[in-house]
Amino acid sequence: MKRVCLVISMAMLGLAGCATGSPEEWDAGIAATERQTRSTDMWTVDTALQNNITSGVIMQRTIYAYHFDPGTARLTELGQRDIGILAGYYKTTPGVLNVMRGDATAELYAARTSSVKAALKDAGVNVDQVQLVAGVPGGTGMSSQEIVDAGKRESEALKGSSLSSPAGQTGGNIGSSSDSGMKGSGQ
């Protein structure tokens, strides 16, 4: 039995010594894996960020003065990006697009709305289905009661969980009748 254990032990030691290549080559494989992981992580974050940007632009449905080069009707890079996002939305969904006037003269504002309409048309949008207005930023918004209710739901969901607020951070008691939402504020 001792002889069998000795043979097995020697065989295992022999196999351990069969690795090929230098340690530098082993590290190159690890480094490549780390680079791939980092690349995947960056893609994941960038995708989530881009989705948030797209959602925000669509919810606002607004082009501001800063989307144009100062004193002109020429869209900035940011303006072109946001028009591209909005074009993707308005290709399938008719609606209203706010073009904020800001301090633009009537002539400049008219040129800016024409520029927005042309950019949408160039992107394949049926501009007859998009109404350009000088309105306020879009979004359905939430009533005060909806915000209070959402806070209560979040507070209830966090009760009993392992999640806790970092030291010194207050909140989580929106609409609570026992402390008026002032927990941790010294009031």
Image: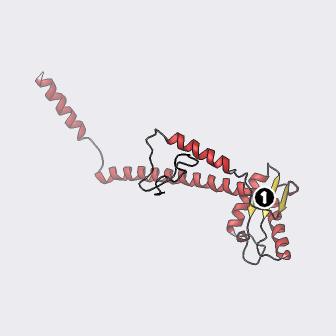
Query: Residue 114: percent from the left, percent from the top?
Result: 84, 67
Specify whether 160 is left or right of 86: left
For badge 1, the amino acid type reads: Ala
In the foreground, 102 or 3: 102
Instruction: Identify the residue shown where x is 73% and y is 67%.
Output: 64
In the foreground, 178 or 41: 178
> Which residue is label 1 attached to?
123
Instruction: Identify the residue shown where x is 16% and y is 28%.
Output: 7
Specify whether 49 is left or right of 184: right
Tell me the quarter of the picture where residue 149 sits: top right
Element type where label 1 sits in the image:
loop
Residue 86 lies, with reference to residue 77, above or below; the image says above
Query: Residue 116: percent from the left, percent from the top?
Result: 80, 65
Instruction: Identify the residue shown where x is 72% and y is 54%.
Output: 139
Query: Residue 32: percent from the left, percent from the top?
Result: 42, 52
Residue 160 lies, with reference to residue 50, above or below; the image says above
Query: Residue 151: percent from the left, percent from the top?
Result: 58, 47
Residue 75 lies, with reference to residue 50, above or below; the image says below
Specify whether 48 is left or right of 23: right
Neighbor class of circle 1 (other Cα within 10 Å; few <14, some 14-19, many 20+) is some
Tell me the quarter of the picture where residue 134 sits: bottom right
